[in-house]
Image: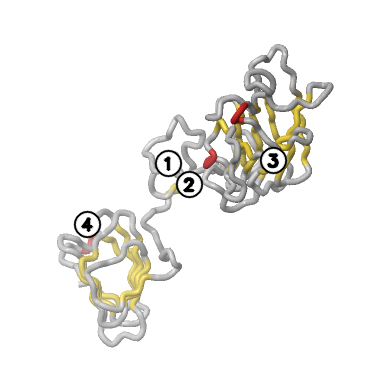
Amino acid sequence: MFRPTNSSESNLFTIRVTLGFGSTRGAFNTGANAIANDAILASNSSGNPTTVDHLASPTSNNLPSGFYIQYSTTGPAFRVYYGKSFTSQPCMNVVPISNNSTTFLAIPYIVKSSLLFCDILFNNASTSVSPSANGTTGLLGFDLVITGPIKIGATTGNSNKGWALSDSTSADPTSVYSYMDVNLGSGFTATDSVVVSKNLKLLGSDNTIKTYSTSTSSLDYTQTVWIINTDVSLTTLTPQTGMVLIITAGSPISTSPTVVLAASKSFGYAGSGNTTLTFSTAGATVILYGIDTTRFVIVSQTTGVTLS
């Protein structure tokens, strides 16, 4: 389950936005940067493009797809469309930005009427606060952080990824999640952890088993269950360290198929002179394990499989 440090909730998603001060537009709501009614100030929505870009941080492509902020002179209010489907109301933190912090007062309040958007307004205890009229004093923008639970499943690239597997050879001290106790044959593993060989691939990416119907020397090691049909010869079989290889004869068999090792390879402790497996009956099966890149050990061998 995905969760930030010290949180019991899974699948939390965070959106952060700095609007106004620090944007490429510079002064907030002044001259060519004036904010008209229904102007969109920040957006990563193809159907609602930015009209007056006051986004200071992050870049728009790091916002959720469908996110945008629209200004309304009624209120006045900033409507924030999340671009995410929260499963319950998200928590929000709004901090107004101003250059004259000792005299400026703007109390933010949030109107939530949907899981898809909210309205942000500012008040100075007696009247509503509009964006700055001169670009130097008053409300110059605001910081916004939204955090809430989303539906399990695919999200955008900036989703909360939580635990992840790493191919590093040591724990990364800069990462909160440096390793897990279950690994895939690589990366940092703790003592007594469970390690599963990454050379164990029972099915292909399309959920199929590798079947050889013609003789070949080009073998597919991305799958580790092979069906070898009648009158087929597989040559240059090469051990892969940690590989579990299961080879079964298909049906029917009229001419015995064979599997031949590559040069200088051997079947484990049976002697270097044994280089060929012959399958004489349908369903005959052998299970091999790669000790290193030169030897396969025969883990299991049924009747109908001979080694020569």
Q: Residue furthest bottom?
A: 254
Q: What is the C-alpha distance between the residues marked 3 and 2?
A: 52 Å
Which image quarter: residue 199? bottom left
283 shown above or below 221? below
Label 2 neighbour load within 10 Å: few <14, some 14-19, many 20+: some
Q: Residue at x 56, y 26 (%)?
A: 26
* Residue 211 image point, x, y percent: 35, 74
Q: Secondary structure at mark 4?
A: loop
Q: Is residue 140 above or below residue 16?
A: above
In front here: 268 or 47?
A: 47
Is residue 131 or residue 302 the one in the foreground? 131
Badges 4 and 3: C-beta atoms under 8 Å apart?
A: no
In the rendering, at what x and y percent does residue 161 appear?
54, 43
Q: Amino acid at mark 1?
A: Thr
From this viewpoint, is residue 268 visible? yes
Q: Return the residue at label 3.
A: 38
The outermost residue toward the top is 102
Residue 241 place in picture, x, y as percent: 30, 54
Q: Secondary structure at mark 2?
A: strand
Q: Mark number for residue 182?
A: 2
Mark-to-mark CA distance, 2 and 4: 28 Å
**Residue 1 visible in the snapshot:** no
Distance Cα–Cα, label 1 vs label 3: 54 Å
Judging by the rendered image, the residue that carries numbered circle 4 is: 294
Of callouts 2 and 4, the N-terminal one: 2
